[in-house]
Amino acid sequence: MLSVKEAQEKVINSKVTIKPKKTTILESLHNILAEELVSKDFIPAFDNSAVDGYAVKAIDILGAEKNYPVKLKLFKEDIPAGKSSSFSLEPGMCIQIMTGAPIPQGCDCVVMKEDALKEGKDVLVFRECRQGENIRYKGEDVSQGDIVLKKGSKIYPADIGLMASVGISEITINTPPLVGVISTGDELIDVGQNLAFGKVRDSNSYSLAAQIIESGAQYKRYGIVPDDKPSIKKKIMEGLQQCEILILTGGVSVGDYDFVKEILDDIGAEFVFWRVNQMPGKPLAFLTYKDRFIFGLPGNPVSVMICFEMYVRPLIKKFLGDKNLFRDKIQARALEDYDHIEGRTDFVRVYLENTEDGIYFKHTGMQGSGILRSMSVADGIAVFPEDRGKIEKDSTIDVIILKQ
């Protein structure tokens, strides 16, 4: 049986094909850039005012203060944003200017409107300005020929604004993979159905779909398939035709009705591993089929979500070309003693608590693999490693952050 580290390495060492595609900048959010973006323009494209106020020469207002203002002649026209100016400012004069308007010749600073008072054809200035104050210079943000975003960068809202500012409206990103989800089991009913004795609502396909979206991929739910070998095989083949990654929940253990492993063997899928030395989620299968990948996850809802975080999410991130395959983790200290079986990795759902002495963790209560609420309230997953036994109070453990 593989260790968690060995299983993760087999997943992330898989050869994937990253496919580029063109998209609009607004649709690129949180995707990975597949090209280098170079600016053809200077941003700003011209020297302009950072405030509403008066364009002046700094030397003309030396010594200006509240009790001893400097009086300047006001030029008859003003400069609104979007209007160019062809005149040159004469000594002893000023001109009213708006935010974003081009700086006229002869001006080397802008007095804020709050620091001046208009009196007829004159302006009283109550504060000195140094050269360059309140002026945004041509190219101070971006110069022509600058690389504004590097290939492999993850795209955030500010990046979209930056692309728009340099005139880029369409870019090439790494195509998010399509991840299919098939839920198997006679006991399953859909979310809108009333519970009957022996039945369970299919929460797995919904939690998985949400995890897929959060990881940056696209999802396709194939619905509930009963424990019937031909039906399962048909749905699996449909999913493999459409999806880069296919997730099956249930049917991978050793029960009489667990057909999935047998079907995958029949269609020629190659098992990379089956079973991992962990709790929850020990009966975990990872297979390849041509250029597709298949995960067979256990049916219990917590096991499903944990296995996705540890194995499916990193593979999705690799398809995206993301440098960060795994979630961030921190080191936190145990608030109490925890029993742990040495020789197995345990994933424990925990609350996190920030204190003056550092970050502490405490389990969320009962840790059964069917207690989905324990995942809902958890801040993170504490990893009790296989080379440690009892986790003693105040000892340090890695905790994977779930909510950021």
Image: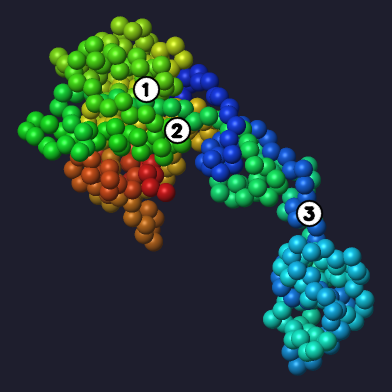
In space, the residues marked 2 and 1 are separated at their CA atoms by 12 Å
Q: Quadrant of the N terminus?
A: top left
Tag 2 or tag 3, which sits nearer the N-term? 3
In space, the residues marked 3 and 2 are separated at their CA atoms by 38 Å
Vertical order, 384 against 251 (above or below)? below
Q: Residue at x 37, y 53 (%)?
A: 359
Q: Are marks 2 and 1 in contact (CB under 8 Å)?
A: no
Q: Secondary structure at mark 2?
A: loop
| Residue 244, picture quadrant | top left
Label 2 amino acid?
Answer: Ala
Label 1 amino acid?
Answer: Leu
Q: Which residue is mark 1?
A: 246
Q: Residue furthest bottom?
A: 67
Q: Which residue is mark 3?
A: 45
Tag 1 or tag 2, which sits nearer the N-term? 2
Nearest to the observer: residue 308 or residue 185 = 185
Q: Residue at x 64, y 42 (%)?
A: 169
Q: Is residue 379 visible?
A: yes
In space, the residues marked 1 and 3 are separated at their CA atoms by 49 Å
Q: Secondary structure at mark 1?
A: strand
Compared across the picture, whether 354 is left or right of 159 comes to: left
Label 3 amino acid?
Answer: Ala
Q: Which residue is mark 2?
A: 217
